[in-house]
Amino acid sequence: MDTLHAKLHRLEQYLKSLEGVVVAFSGGVDSAFLMAAAHRVLGEAAIAVTARSCAFPKRELEEARRLAREEGIRHIEFDFPAFQVKGFAENPPERCYYCKTAILKQIKGLAGEEGIKHIVEGSNVDDEKDYRPGAKAIGEQGILSPLKEAGLTKAEIRELSKEWGLPTWNKQSAACLASRFAYGETITEEKLSMVEQAESFLLDQGFGQLRVRVHGSLARIELSDIDFARVVDPKMRKKLNEVLGELGFSYVTLDLQGYRMGSMNETLKRE
């Protein structure tokens, strides 16, 4: 079995063989580690690229900017009009495929302008456990997944990130805000803003890994087990209901199963 640092060596050799890369960079745990690894191996031949959109939380964008600045890597941003993507607003199960395809095509255009052949993204081996239509887009667009090639898991990426002193080593897992909507539920800019503000409020209250899922006018909150006691405190319940009610949610519920990756995909597995 490969040791952690054997996998790291494999990653570094893989990146070195590419000579230059554009990193699809969201500022999350995986893409931040990949960005840092690429920059350490390739120096100025590594560039980070981030898509700005209404489905990308503003606090995540600010964190991505800060991380790139602290790492000293060149960081390019571009505006991505998500609602111009066919199927985005209608939100079918394949939504992520359509959106990812459009984003990657724009990144490929930027890479071409920079004279860089290879684009890399941060999928790891654990991502194969969930329904991820975006993975199809990654393959079709010829995007490389070095962390997966190296055999790295999410836990191992966190461990290496901690060794390197990256602030993302214990960061909560993030995802596009569109992933908060039940499939078939129409996505609007107003509802995306409601989700972003609701989650931002919870994060500001000190809650950790979380999601606010949308089912019509109902907000279904997923939290880590450790946060259950805090959220059911009468004062917190009252404040949470007030804040989310003001944002436009008619009902606020707590999911007793707690946070889990891709919970909206559970209905697909039962069909």
Image (cartoon, rainbow, N blue to C red):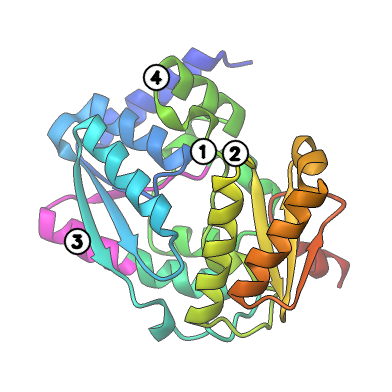
Sequence-wise, which precedes: disc 3 or disc 2? Answer: 3
Q: Indicate the position of residue 18 as horizontal and vertical percent values.
A: 26, 37
Q: Is residue 136 above or below residue 127?
A: below
Q: Say whether marks 1 and 4 touch (CB < 8 Å).
A: no
Say the numbered circle drawn on residue 165: 4
Say the numbered circle drawn on residue 148: 1
Q: Amino acid at mark 2?
A: Val
Q: Amino acid at mark 4?
A: Gly
Sequence-wise, which precedes: disc 3 or disc 4? Answer: 3
Q: Amino acid at mark 1?
A: Lys
Residue 91, picture quadrant: bottom right
Q: Indicate the position of residue 230 as horizontal and vertical percent values.
A: 77, 41
Q: Say whether marks 2 and 1 touch (CB < 8 Å).
A: yes
Q: Indicate the position of residue 157 as horizontal and vertical percent values.
A: 51, 28
Callout 4: SS: loop
Q: Nearer the viewer, residue 149 or 247?
A: 247
The furthest residue to the front: 235
Please report the residue visible at 51 percent of the width from the left and 80 percent of the height from the top.
190
* Mark pair 3, 4: CA separation: 30 Å
Q: Nearer the viewer, residue 227 or 173?
A: 227
Q: Indicate the position of residue 158 as horizontal and vertical percent values.
A: 53, 27
54 lies left or right of 198: left
106 inside magenta stretch:
yes
Residue 269, picture quadrant: bottom right
* Mark pair 2, 1: CA separation: 5 Å
* Mark pair 1, 4: CA separation: 22 Å
